[in-house]
Image (cartoon, grey):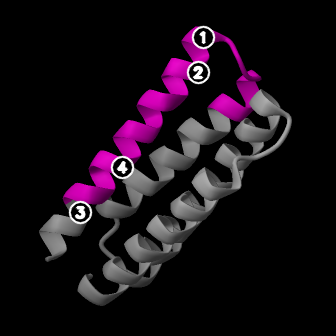
Amino acid sequence: MSLAIDIFITLYALLTMAAAIAHLLSKDISITLIVGLFLSAFITLTSLMISSKLLSLDTLLLGLLGISVFTLANGYHLYGRPHWSHHLIRLVVHIAIFVIALMTW
């Protein structure tokens, strides 16, 4: 189970980084939001490489929180308002990732 959540977190972080790069190429949002999203995904990915369970979970939580904040800001910047159902689903996914990581690491 630990390997499965590690693979899922890796894919999730890499897809988030790819989305940040796609926004960078389309130039539809500010560079600050793009960099914040990319770094939050990188922090999430980095949490897999930390050997201390406590520091790893703290880093994972920080990265997931950053992804949530920057995607909410991106939605506001792109559409004038956040798409709440999308962010609610993202919140549920982030909580599930954190709880599963907490139980398996």
Kind of residue at disc 1 = Ser
Q: Position of residue 68 (x, y in %)?
A: 63, 56
Element at label 4: helix
Taking the magenta stretch, the answer to whether it contains residue 12 is yes
Left or right: 81, with 69 as reference point: right
Q: CA distance from mark 2 to mark 1?
A: 5 Å
**Residue 26 bears which disc, if any?**
1
Give the mark nearest the N terminus, 1 or 4. Answer: 4
Give the mark nearest the N terminus, 3 or 4. Answer: 3
Packing grade of label 3 (10 A; few <14, some 14-19, many >=20) is some
**Residue 12 bears which disc, if any?**
4
Image quarter (top left, top right, bottom left or bottom right) of the C terminus: bottom left
Dots 2, 1 in contact, CB < 8 A: yes
Say which quarter of the image contains residue 54: bottom left
The residue depicted at 53 percent of the width and 59 percent of the height is 90
Q: Which residue is mark 3?
A: 6
Image quarter (top left, top right, bottom left or bottom right) of the N terminus: bottom left
The span shown in magenta is: 7-34
Kind of residue at disc 2 = His
Q: Which residue is mark 2?
A: 23
